[in-house]
Image: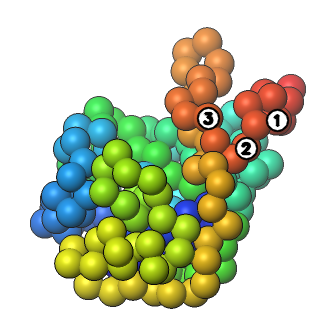
Amino acid sequence: MAYPTDTLYGLAVDPRQDEPVERLIRAKGRDAGRGIPLIAASLEQAQEVAVFGPQDLTLARAFWPGPLTLVLRSRGRVANGISADGRTIAIRVPAHDVARLLAGSLSFPVTATSANLSGNPPASTADEVAHALASSIDLLLDAGPAPGGAPSTIVEMATHGPRLVRTGAVAWDRVIKSLE
C-alpha cells in the first residue's frame, strides 16, 4: 500500500510478516541489508516495538509528530528484513493524519520506506507513485500531495551522544539544542 506522509509518499506493509517485507524489498529493488523504517500512530505505539532511552524520549517528545526518525533497539517484534543490523529499527510518528490513522487502525506500526524504486527520486504525489510502482502495489491511498522536500532526519543515540545518520527535514542544530 502506498500512502502520504508529512514528507513524501511511503509504502506500508505489516512489518511483522516476512513475506510482505520481502515483497516490499523486491518491489523497490532495495538492498535487503539496508533495513526499512517504520511509522507509528503515537509514541506509545512506537514503544511497543522499540526501546527508548531518556535522550530518545526527549527527541520524540520534542519532534513528534514530525519528520524525525530515531534508530532504537528493537524489541524483536518485527520481521528480520526491517532491521539493518538485526538489533535496531528506525521509527517515527509522522505529522500527517492519514499516516497516523493507518498505523493506528492496524494497532501496530507500519513500514514507511519511500514509494519509489531504489535510487530514483521519491514520490510526493499519488500519480508519481502510480507511474513508478503501479505493478508492485495493491492499494494506492491518494490523500493529496505530500509536502515533498527533504525526507525525515534520522538520528541514533551512540555511546558518545547523538549521531546524524541522514540529513533531512529537521535541522541537526535543532536536534542538538533539544538535548541541552
Mark 3: secondary structure: loop
Judged from this view, the residue extending furthest toward the top is 160
Q: CA distance from mark 1 to mark 2?
A: 7 Å
The local crowd at label 2, few if under 14, some if 14 to 19, many if 20 or more residues have their Cα within 10 Å, is: some
Q: Position of residue 47 (x, y in %)?
A: 53, 56
Q: Which residue is mark 1?
A: 174
In the image, what residue type sits under mark 2? Answer: Val
Mark 1: secondary structure: helix
In the image, what residue type sits under mark 1? Answer: Arg
Query: To which quarter of the image does residue 113 belong?
Result: bottom left
The local crowd at label 1, few if under 14, some if 14 to 19, many if 20 or more residues have their Cα within 10 Å, is: few
Q: CA distance from mark 1 to mark 3?
A: 12 Å
Q: Are marks 1 and 3 in contact (CB under 8 Å)?
A: no
Mark 2: secondary structure: loop
In the image, what residue occupies the spot 29% across and 71% down?
A: 133
167 w.r.t. 113: above or below: above
In the image, what residue type sits under mark 3? Answer: Thr
In the image, what residue occupies the spot 63% across and 61% down?
A: 148
Q: Which residue is mark 2?
A: 170
In the image, what residue occupies the spot 67% across and 67% down?
A: 147
Question: Mark 1 against mark 3, which lies toward the viewer?
Answer: 3
Q: Are marks 1 and 2 in contact (CB under 8 Å)?
A: yes
Query: To which quarter of the image does residue 77 belong?
Result: bottom left
Judged from this view, the residue extending furthest toward the left is 19
- Judging depth in this view, the residue of 114 and 123 nearest the camera is 123
The local crowd at label 3, few if under 14, some if 14 to 19, many if 20 or more residues have their Cα within 10 Å, is: some
Q: Position of residue 142 (x, y in %)?
A: 51, 87
